[in-house]
Image (cartoon, rainbow, N blue to C red):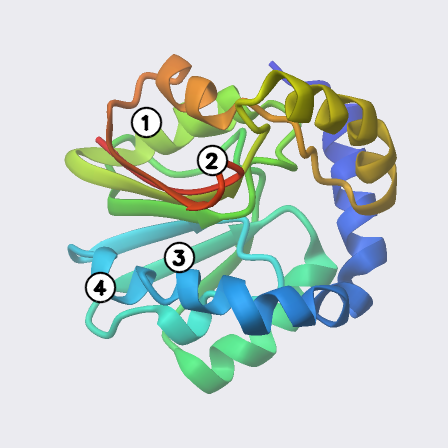
Amino acid sequence: MFKTSSQNLARMRYDRMAFLYDFIEAPLERFRFAGWRARLRDRISGRTALEAGVGTGKNTPYYPDGVKIIAIDLSPRMLKRAHKKVVHDHPSVELLEMDAQQLAFPDNSFDTVFGTFVFCSVPDPVAGLRELRRVCKPDGRLLLLEHMRPESSFAGMIFDLLNPIVVRMVGANINRRTVENIRTAGWHIQVEEKLSADIVRWIEAV
């Protein structure tokens, strides 16, 4: 079980950054991230879907029609910004303040569970991924767009050295072994595509 202090620290960091978050990521969003996020439009399926870590709502333009989507985030200030985008793009989406490590949904609630660039900041990523598995239907699917520690020993060491600084600045860990975490949480990876070297990957699991 994660410590409450870790949850509070994560919330404070993202509340603090909420008003600048889109501005800081604007160049990457325009030239790289948006194109990768667009995959969600074709890959989210079923009647119900859950987005973990909606942030400021950058994925909302790519939500497909005809799917009931619930989107959660730990930070109320990020949710406030997401609300503006949801109202414009998909007014039927339900936004909830909730921790990915403790989801308030019954087992087997969603056909698709997904997140983008979120498990770098969840205090206990394996706990969060296990929660997503719990609430996903047996025939459902996990979709993730994530950055992670590179496989190269030298590059990995650099990421490890820089990680404490990056976490303090923006709250995201750059050295998470996310593929290992997904498997540890009980998911079976079906698709693993390297989008930017081996640092950013698109993952689908069941």
For marks 4 and 1 on the same chain, the one whose residue lies earlier in the sequence:
4
Q: Residue at x 80, y 69 (%)?
A: 19
Real-space Cα distance between discs 4 and 1? 23 Å
For marks 1 and 3 on the same chain, the one whose residue lies earlier in the sequence:
3
Q: Residue at x 40, y 57 (%)?
A: 70
Disc sitting over residue 134 in the figure: 1
Whole-percent x and y of residue 130? Answer: 41, 23
In the image, taking residue 23 as reference, residue 55 lies left or right, namely: left
Q: Nearer the viewer, mark 4 or mark 2?
A: 4
Q: Are marks 4 and 3 in contact (CB under 8 Å)?
A: no
- Amino acid type for the residue under numbered disc 2: Leu
Front-most of 175 and 198? 198
Front-most of 23 and 63? 23
Q: Quadrant of the C terminus?
A: top left
For marks 2 and 1 on the same chain, the one whose residue lies earlier in the sequence:
2
Give the SS element for disc 1. helix
Disc sitting over residue 148 in the figure: none
Give the SS element for disc 3. strand
- The 10 Å Cα crowd at callout 1, few under 14, some 14 to 19, many 20 or more, is some
Front-most of 142 and 82? 142
The residue that disc 3 covers is: 70
For marks 4 and 3 on the same chain, the one whose residue lies earlier in the sequence:
4
Whole-percent x and y of residue 131? Answer: 42, 28
- The 10 Å Cα crowd at callout 3, few under 14, some 14 to 19, many 20 or more, is some
Give the SS element for disc 2. loop
- 175 vs 194: above or below: above
Real-space Cα distance between discs 4 and 2? 25 Å
Q: Are marks 2 and 1 in contact (CB under 8 Å)?
A: yes
Disc sitting over residue 42 in the figure: 4
The residue that disc 2 covers is: 103
In the image, taking residue 54 as reference, residue 40 lies left or right, namely: left
Real-space Cα distance between discs 4 and 3? 17 Å
